[in-house]
Image: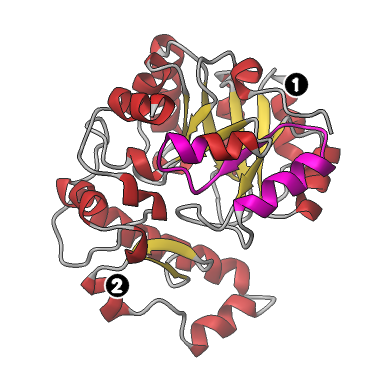
Amino acid sequence: MENQQSITDLLGIKHPVIMAPMFLVSNVSMLLEASKAGITGCVPALNYRTIEAFETALKELKEKSEGPFGVNLIVNKSNFLYKEQLKSCCKYKVDYIITSLGSPEETINMAHKAGVKVFCDVVNLDYAKKVEVLGADALIAVNKEAGGHFGPTSYEELIPLLVNNCSIPVISAGGVGNHEQMQKMLNLGAAGVSVGSLFIASTESDVSNEYKEACVKYGAKDIIASNKLSGSDCTVINTPYVMEMGTQQNGLEKFLNKNKGLKKWFKAFTFYKGMKKFEKAAFSATYKTVWCAGPSIEYVTAVKPVEAIVKDLVNG
């Protein structure tokens, strides 16, 4: 279908790239540098513990950003701050919201009233058609190469499937580590790409030097999936501590995750506990290293400023 208006037109940016929202990693400085470099950045609302801290960040982005910026919202019941976060996004009129892990219906309705675009994470055609009907402005096609939570399908299969069957832009998420890979996604019909792991080792990121150096040192072969940290499969670097901890939930955890009455609370508890592990590892030197990253760290060769990472990506 003729749906692929580039995100350069959709968002008014120079290059068709979203700096993907990364839990604990994305921050205001990174988004401001992204805007200067001609791309757009997105930050998870959950990177802020309180609504006050979240609104302080939105206010600064509104005042200083040279281009559009977005917020990633977890829209299911595990995010107890969701409704307040959505109100804040509408109040400060962020340029776009990326929804994850739940029905985006309420988000789309409220955001559109405030003039905010909504892009929805999707992993298959069925869900893509549902969010299109709900009024989503674009699809974030999460493929099996994505870092963090990933989809079951390769980008070679997923992009054409969505492009040919949906009438809104498809933004590919996962598997972009260099200019050639970005070009491949665009040639398949993607309206743009969402890139995360390359930016973990950026100068502007607040994570520990150990985490950044791990992204330089480890490669695609060192990325594995674990469901122990958020209840869903999530990619992490296979450090000695991750090997020791194991990557799969035990029998009791699996039972609680599936039990109708308890799963909402257990998922929230698992998510909270896993995020605490991520947080500790991200910001301090500890042997308990649980670092989230995707296979694209294969192309991270040094810690660089956001501007240099963008230049490498868009110019080759």
The mark closer to the camera, 2 or 1, is: 2
The structure residue drawn at horizontal position 84% and vertical position 43%, both measured from the top left corner, is 165
Amino acid type assigned to the residue bearing label 2 in the image: Val
Give coordinates of residue 310: x percent, y percent: 37, 27
Find out whether residue 178 is within the magenta segment. Answer: yes
Task: Judge by depth and name the residue closer to the eye, 201 or 299.
Answer: 299
- Please determine whether, in this image, residue 215 is positioned above or below residue 259: above
Q: What residue is disc 1 on? A: 113
Amino acid type assigned to the residue bearing label 1 in the image: Lys
- Determine whether, in the image, residue 147 is placed left or right of residue 215: right
Task: Judge by depth and name the residue closer to the eye, 126 or 301.
Answer: 301
**Secondary structure under the numbered disc 2 in the rendered image:** helix
**Residues in magenta?**
155-182
Task: Judge by depth and name the residue closer to the eye, 310 or 234.
Answer: 310
Mark linked to residue 242: 2
Q: CA distance from mark 2 to mark 1?
A: 44 Å
Crowd tier of the residue under label 1, counting other residues whose Cα lies within 10 Å: few below 14, some 14–19, many 20 or above: few
The structure residue drawn at horizontal position 28% and vertical position 44%, both measured from the top left corner, is 300
Task: Judge by depth and name the residue closer to the eye, 304 or 186.
Answer: 186
Crowd tier of the residue under label 2, counting other residues whose Cα lies within 10 Å: few below 14, some 14–19, many 20 or above: some
